[in-house]
Amino acid sequence: MKIGFIGLGIMGSRMAANLIKAGYTVHVFNRTPEKAEVLKGDHVHIKKSPEMVAMDSDVIFTMLSTPEAVQEVALGDEGLMNGMGKGKVWIDSSTVNPSFSRQMAELAEQLGFNFLDAPVAGSMAPAEKGELVFLVGGKKTIVKYCAPLFKVMGKKFIHVGDAGQGSALKLVNNLLMGLSMYAFTEGLVLGESLGIDKALIFDMMEGSPIAAPMVSLKRQKISTGDFSAEFPLQWLQKDLQLATQTAYEQGIALPGTNIIKEIFALAKQAGLADKDFTAIYQYLSKEQSQ
């Protein structure tokens, strides 16, 4: 099985590296060509366009930042759609809105190839260790065919349902992650303003039913002020925006998410876009001190 991989950022580069380590021949493309250079090797072929990746691959993964980026790679000049054919599989692991995934699935069916939406739960470290969780939407037979690839890059995969359902569960996951981190951050800022040591607040929260386990995973970043990106703040803000967009499409209200996504947007505008999303603490702390 020949694999294509398009999008070699924080997550994609590590996912592709694990496929290469497992012995797969991987055809890669990145819009910033320099990022593909780190994957050079006997089983790696750097291509000049998504179309060329698709032409030479059986299964093509995309791991991109936004629905607009996915659409450009898929449908643009020299897009991957031009290289797809019967029996091939496109797996989009980008975090996008469910309606977009369903649109791509319908287009794939019209053109005679297969599509799965398979975003992942997990950030940089799990991607590097091959411990991601794939949330997969699409036909069961195609999920089974691609299962060995999911197992190379992840500790498990969950077949959520039809096309779009993997993306739906991923938005739920990231909504909860964003709101949980924000809630903890507000509590932390309040506690510090009252003279409580940051470490004591963490110690109290860790292992308690109040705080999500993610708080423990991110403790070092907040404690040391090292906000180097594992999951950039701008992409969490984008995911919260996609969640509210999807809620609008579904005719439901997400009042809390709408407010908090705008606070993350303010943090992004304040220069924290490329920092880890835990930098929301840095933003709130600075706002309170001004």
Image: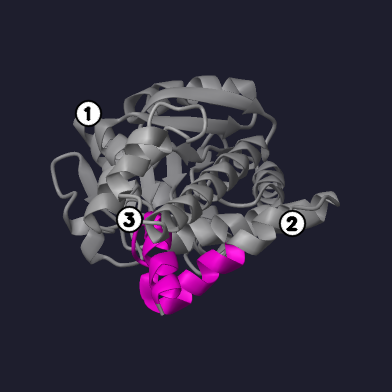
Q: Which amino acid does label 3 sit on?
A: Gly
Residue 221 in the image, given as x and y percentages of width and height: 27, 51
Judge the density around disc 1: few (<14), some (14-19), many (≥20) Cα neighbours within 10 Å.
few
> Within the magenta stretch, is there residue 144?
no
Question: Which of these two is toward me, 189 or 7?
Answer: 189
Residue 146 in the image, given as x and y percentages of width and height: 47, 26
Instruction: Compute the Cα span from label 2 to label 3.
Output: 32 Å
Q: Are marks 2 and 3 in contact (CB under 8 Å)?
A: no
Residue 286 in the image, given as x and y percentages of width and height: 38, 72
Look at 24% across and 40% down and name the residue there: 17
In the rendered picture of this protein, how many numbered marks are placed on residues?
A: 3
> Within the magenta stretch, is there residue 285?
yes
Q: Quadrant of residue 86?
A: top right
Look at 61% across and 42% down and name the residue there: 167
Between disc 1 and disc 2, the foreground one is 2
Q: What residue type is labelled 1?
A: Gly
Look at 47% across and 38% down and name the residue there: 120
Query: In the displayed structure, would residue 10 be above or below residue 134?
Result: below
Q: Mark 2 highlights which residue?
A: 255
Residue 7 in the image, given as x and y percentages of width and height: 38, 54
> Residue 23, labelled with which disc?
1
Name the element at disc 3.
loop
Principal SS element in the magenta part? helix
Q: Mark 3 highlights which residue?
A: 9
